[in-house]
Amino acid sequence: MKNLNFFLTLLLGFIITSCAKRGTITGGPKDTIAPVLVKSVPKNYETNFNGNEIRIDFSEYIKIKDVNKQLIISPPMDKKPTVSPQGSASKFISIKLNEELKPNTTYSFNFGQSIVDYNEGNPYNQFKYVFSTGSFVDSLKVSGKFMDAFENKADDYVNIQLYDATTFKDSTIYKEVPRYVTNTLDKNTSFTIENIKAGEYYLIALKDKNNDYKFQPKTEKIAFRKEKIKIPTDSTYLLKLFKEKTKAKFFKPTQESNNKLFLGFEGEKRQIKVVGKKDNKEIPLFVTNYSKEEKKDTLQIFLPENIKDSLQLKVIAENYEKEFSVKLKKMKISDSLSIKLNENQNLTFRDLVKLKTSTPVAKINKDKIQLKKRDSISIPFETLSDIYNESIIFDFTKEENESYNIKLLPGAIEDIYGNKNDSLAFTYKTAKISDFGNLKLRLKNVKRFPLVVEILANENTIVDHFYSEKETEINFEGIKPSLYTIRIYYDDNKNRSWDTGNYLQKKQPEELIYFSEKIDVRANWDVDQVLELNK
């Protein structure tokens, strides 16, 4: 009997053990639900508000993050309220107001995505707390979209601002905060300003880098609507952000060598003239572009060798003129003539052959230059000295799959200081025609002429362009295989370059269009592409 009881006990234990399953404690499903508002004191959309503190309670522990960037208060407050707690877990938010409120005004606190649950970070998306110091809450709104006038990508965190038309002046956006404001945060190109009072307003967009709601032309982008808007309205508005052209400003020149000065500047460098004087007599100067990236906003000024001690420089640009007194010192470094091959040795049939010089060229002796093909046959060519870009340009008819040798005999090139080259040789190669592709663009629904068509690689590198005064079928032949973006702008002032806007002049930027689909140009392909300009 004892043996039987033991056997039954052992069998029962085996059965129980076999039925057990191994498992892992998971803690339950992941929380994906955002916090929920339980109550607020005063309640949301309260009227006749006259307090200075607000408490908002939630259904679970929350934390506040990036509130200084995410919280948008409309109308803006001079003294930002104190929002707590920040970063730590809490079931409520406390808002302490630090300035006197305006009478009969609806205030809106949009927290963006700054309120998240403490454990999983689920945001209480675009939570708004609204109250009015008057007897009712304003409920009108205005909507629209914004885009960048030049770039193919829109900025994030853009302010959309409304100003009361009855008190608005052109200087208002530089000095005063708007009546109403919203912010697109980090993803939106659409906007809606809510809780607006009926009336007439001026509408602008601002990439507000220092968060003061005021326009700083030197560093910030702006978009504006010239005409007033009347609210209520069913219209939506498109705003195009642009950076104004910075006014030309030049800095005191610095001496870099015995015969060269560096002239730093801000703004546009087109149409710049530099005049030098010594003892009230004008002296010849050579101004060139300093192309190195670290000093791209710099010009080089080459001086005559006989200038000693000091000289006067006058810099003239659009609506700008300034004189500098420059003291010169004897330096060990003097600029000598050196000549380099341009970086791209494998040429397309569209490229110009260039030699880069270190000093401005005064003379080119073609009789001391030889240009030959691989089989040593001489070919005709023309040369051009581009002093501003310190280049010697060779123009000749190129053939496919060919090698060209340029030989400079001693004295072929002479710079402004009388320095001459030693014997030099450079080799250029061209690829096969079949290594390149051809692109035909057919433009439909063109609004006006002239226009400029640009082919872009890597979104912003201009590979080629075409200025059209009437053509709607444009051929780009012999271009490298790649995916290309097409950009077109209407050149309304016919200066063959895109022009930005100006707020005070009430000038909008020139209309520019990007085509969303890239065009795939492959080797030995002919691509025929229709582009609709009214889309």
Image: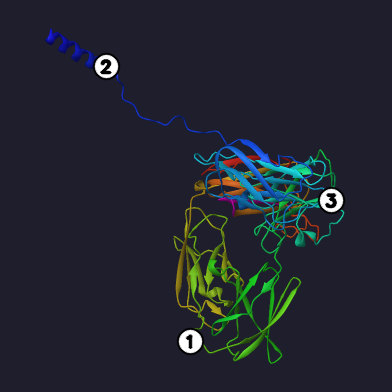
Is 524 above or below relative to 413?
Answer: above
Is 107 above or below relative to 25?
Answer: below
Q: Quadrant of residue 12?
A: top left
Question: Which residue is more in the foreground, 246 or 534?
Answer: 246
Q: Could you say where residue 364 lies in the image, as x and y percent from the top left? A: 57, 75
The three-letter amino acid code for the residue at tag 3 is Glu
Is-magenta flag for residue 459?
yes
Which portion, as a residue range, is magenta? 451-461
Q: Which mark is residue 332?
A: 1
Disc 3 residue crowd, few under 14, some 14–19, many 20+, Cα 10 Å: few
Residue at the spot x=50%, y=39% of the render? 120
In the displayed orientation, state which residue is furthest to the top.
1
Is 327 above or below relative to 120?
Answer: below
Choose mark 3 or mark 1, whichever is in front. Answer: 3
Distance from disc 2 to disc 1, alpha carbons, whole Å, reads 97 Å
For label 2, the SS is: helix
The three-letter amino acid code for the residue at tag 2 is Ile
Q: Is residue 192 visible?
A: no
Distance from disc 3 to disc 1, alpha carbons, whole Å, reads 62 Å
For label 3, the SS is: loop
Residue holding disc 2: 16
